[in-house]
Image (cartoon, rainbow, N blue to C red):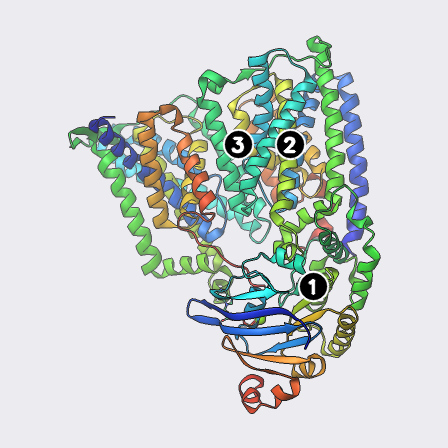
Amino acid sequence: MSEKDLMTRRIKPITTAAVIFFLVSAVAPLFVASWATLFALILAKGIVVLGIVLLLQAGQVSFGHAMFFAIGAYTSAFWGKYVGGGDILLYLVLGGISSTVFGLIVGLFVVRYREIFFGMLNLAFSMVLWSLLEKMFPYTNGADGIRVARPGLLGFVFTPETFQYVILYVSLLIAAAAFYGVQRYLESPLGHMLRAIKSNETRLEYLGMSARRVLLIGYVISAFLGGIGGTLVAIIQQIATPEFGFWTKSGEFVFIAILGGGAHAFGAFAGAAMFECVRFYAAAHLADSWQLILGVVLIVIILYAPNGLIGLRQRYRQSGKGGR
Amino acid sequence: MNSTLAILAVLDGISYAALVFLVSVGLSLIFGVLRVVNVAHGSLYAFGAYLAATFSIKVAPLSPWLTYPALLAASIVIGVVCGGFIERVLLRPLYGRDDVLQLLITFAAFMIMDNLQRLIWGVQPIFAAEPLKLLPNVTVFGVNYTSYQVILLPAVAVATLFGLRYFLRRTLAGAVIMAVTEDREASTSIGIDARRVYFVTFIIGASLAALGGALASPTTSLVPGMGADMIVLSFAVAATAGLGQIEGAALTALMIGLTRAFVIYLQPEFEVLVPYLLMVLVLLVRPYGLFGATQMRKI
Amino acid sequence: MADVLLSARDIKIRFGGVIAADGINLDVHEGENLAIIGPNGAGKTTFLNISTGYLRPQAGTVTFLGQDITAHLPRTITKLGIARAFQIPQLFLDQTVMENMLIAAASRQGYPSGFKALARLPEASEMERLLELVGVRSYAERTARELPEGQRKLVDIALALALKPRLLLMDEPTSGVASSEKLEIMDILTTALAKEKVTSVFVEHDMDMVERYAHRVAVWNVGKIQKIGTPAEVLADPKVQQQVIGI
Ligand SMILES: Nc1ncnc2c1ncn2[C@@H]1O[C@H](COP(=O)(O)OP(=O)(O)OP(=O)(O)O)[C@@H](O)[C@H]1O
Ligand SMILES: [Mg+2]
């Protein structure tokens, strides 16, 4: 059976799953109020992880992507602290712009590197940002972080009860749009070229393309998604701390991507849902060992379902095909 | 900055560099042979430190001198048990699969170890300065300093450097490891059992991380998060040097240790920034690190 | 005489102790098929690497249509009109053969903007024709990784053709292809090249192929061109027979 058959067969049920997932996120929290924030968080993180999944297409793992997440979050935090007032939409626009600009600057350097060096350099950049956030106490409050006051939306202000739904639906809209956009991008020539970087950069260059440019475009999109996700999380949790940019956060995003399955955009949301749910319930019942539980989950997934949650169906058919 | 402070900074830098070198050379060795960045390396360092503290607190009442073998015992126990487990159980099924998965499974090991560490040893700082206090202080250019830090630690680091060099260049087991580092396909095709090499190398690398932790334990209070900080620092050293470069790691550790020590005296806020900034700068100029070399693909 | 397309002057390169090019001078004329022959390790692939910017020679220059391309990157040279098929096929192994071809088609236009799906590019039928030409049409929907070596080499050639080059460099184009099919493929290929007015340089070990399809032959030996001329002249040379062909 050809790969193409597998692909078309796989995409259909996954797209259906994605639609169901977005519908559930819209409806379920109406019945259980505590789920509103949970789902908002899942969607926001899913957006960040979408960026990781993009880079995974090119075979690159950024172990510093939390820097864009932190930049999105701190953009809102700084605005609230120094300018005051604020609006969800404004925060998103600012977070999007700052992370894109930052992504472009960092990207210009990191796209010259591949594999472990790419991961390392991203890590180094993110750690520089983290140390600055942590140490520039007068501006950033250091490790305590900056509180983000609950913003309005288009001039409306909300009670905390309504607000959690407002931010949920904002996150949902953005997540759905990002999901669709990333899908389209990956199917476009540029998206295919991004995948081509993973298997044969030499050929790409010999077709007249600059692999670095192709990767840079993917990188900037991925930074943008990171920034948007960070902005949303800062608004949802009403705080931005240096922890947002620490390497373990970056690791967590890569973790979620692999958990969901790095081969498909929906993996980002499947992974985020699983991750946040485990954390939500483990933290409630086993406050001391949720990290341990997540670690074990990750090991089980990697060893027994390397294609992630969305790859589970494929497990048996894929056997015999190496990972590279 | 007066000269006393400068000497103090140099001494701080050297003792710090010695510890960092031990940890990063382990990381570098593992990468050179297995092509895996061991994210749990910092946790091995932390476990080494905690177990060493536990041991030395236990044996100190018998005789304070027993704390030295206790440090060594702790690092070997951690290296063999934890390191062996990570390689044999977690990494082994993943050889030949996507590199991301190998990296990530060590990340899982990091998460678990980080959590276990808090469950076992709690979150309160632990002190076990016995070995440090046993040795007398020395005066270096008019500056009083513990000989544990300015003599013992650098001595262990230098011994490790030369020991590793000797082991890798002059012994059969070392030659086998070098062969695998240089060309994995070729070495397996001449009948080298790569799996055993991986196992042994991982244990050596893990033991070095744990040794770094064990030796650090008398000099600092043990707190949660020490592993997470150490791993990025040792990444920085190993990457700056060029992954797999042993002598390079020593020089880079020294460079980072000294720079950091001076920054602490001059501009303490920027202490944590130093290694990452150096790493960014070096990698931008030399992608494969200071001592690494490029490889060209055959087409 | 026809125009000189590619011209190499005094190319030198050595890798440690290995001399791979030791003063190579060569002109490739518009419209010809030039064969390069020579023993293993003579420096044939190295010459193609230098001509396409993958390697920089330690001395000497390469010009294409009068323009110095010695220091250019492969992608810049590709855009000038040189395409290459490799000794070791260079394919996008995780994508289907058709996707490989469409990526080439999209690359030809520079940076494709917009979100149009790759699968819907208008060049699809043209790419199918090229796959048909080299005889791998039936593999179009297969992942490149699944293809046997010989078929990979043919797809590799099709990728180069998709760029509509002026000059096509091929490194042992039919090695790995079943010998029963070699002739047929080279027949079709050279006919197509002639029709499209594509000049070609191909490295070849099979003297039969050289005799049939080359207008000129250059004999490589330890980084030097030992002899160059028509196949008849060159293959008749006793020194060449002895040292290179090994009769
Ligand atoms: N990048 C490189 N680094 C080191 N040595 C190289 C490099 N490229 C080629 N060589 C060496 O240069 C010599 C010529 O290699 P080249 O690949 O050009 O030979 P060739 O004529 O194509 O041989 P074959 O018929 O086997 O393909 C060989 O000894 C090869 O090992
Ligand atoms: Mg060759």
- Mark sitting earlier along the chain (3/2): 2
Q: Are marks 2 and 1 in contact (CB under 8 Å)?
A: no
Q: Compute the Cα span from label 1 to label 3.
A: 42 Å
Disc 3: which chain? A
Q: Nearer the viewer, residue A291 or B6?
A: B6
Q: Residue at x 78, y 23 (%)?
A: A26
C71 sits to left or right of C83: left
* Residue C76: mark in rendering: none
Percent across and percent down for residue C222 are 49, 77
Q: Nearer the viewer, residue A44 or C34?
A: C34
**Residue type for callout 3:** Thr
Percent across and percent down for residue C189 are 76, 72
Labels 1 and 3 share a subunit: no
Say if C31 sits above or below C227 in the image. above
> Which element carries disc 3, helix, strand or loop?
helix
Q: Compute the Cα span from label 3 to label 2.
A: 20 Å
Give the residue at mark 2.
Answer: A224
Q: Are marks 3 and 2 in contact (CB under 8 Å)?
A: no
Say if A277 sits above or below C215 in the image. above
Q: Are marks 1 and 3 in contact (CB under 8 Å)?
A: no
Q: Residues within 10 Å of mark 1 (few under 14, many from 20)?
A: many
Q: Quadrant of the N terminus of chain B?
A: top left
Give the residue at mark 3.
Answer: A248
Percent across and percent down for residue B130 are 26, 28
> Which element carries disc 1, helix, strand or loop?
helix
Give the residue at mark 1.
Answer: C156
